[in-house]
Amino acid sequence: MEAALNSPYKDFISFYDEENKESLKYAIKRCIEKNKEKNKNLKKIEKIIENEKKEILKLLKYVQERS
C-alpha cells in the first residue's frame, strides 16, 4: 500500500477508500459537467461550420453561374 500511495496514481487510488466516497462523487460530477461544457462548445463549432458550408456553397453557385 505504501508504494501505491507514492505512485502517480495515488489520487485515483484514494477515490476507492471508503472514507473518500464523496470525493469520487464530486470527481464524477465534475467530469459530467466538463463533458456537458465540451458538448455545448462542440455544438457551437458545428453550427459555425454548417454556416460556413452554406456560405461556401452560395459562393460556389455564384461562381458557376458567372462562368
Image (cartoon, rainbow, N blue to C red):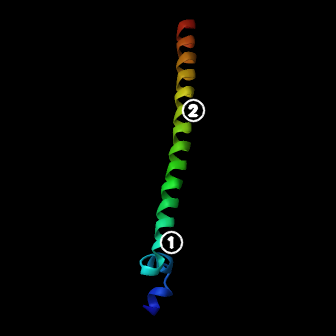
Query: Percent x, y for residue 6?
Result: 51, 87
According to the image, label 1 marks what residue?
23
Query: In this orientation, which residue lies closer to the viewer: 53 or 67?
Result: 53
Q: Residue at x 58, y 17 (%)?
A: 59
* Alpha carbons under labels 1 and 2: distance apart: 37 Å
Disc 2 marks a residue whose amino acid type is Ile
Q: Residue at x 51, y 35 (%)?
A: 46
Query: Percent x, y for residue 11?
Result: 50, 77
Count residues near mark 2 (Cα–Cα under 10 Å), then give few for <14, some for 14-19, many for 20+: few
Is 55 displayed left or right of 10 in the figure? Answer: right
**Residue 48 has which mark?**
2
Of discs 1 and 2, which sits in the foreground?
Answer: 1
Query: In this orientation, which residue lies closer to the viewer: 28 or 51?
Result: 28
Disc 1 marks a residue whose amino acid type is Ser
Quadrant assignment for the N terminus: bottom left
Is label 1 in contact with label 2 (beta carbons under 8 Å)? no
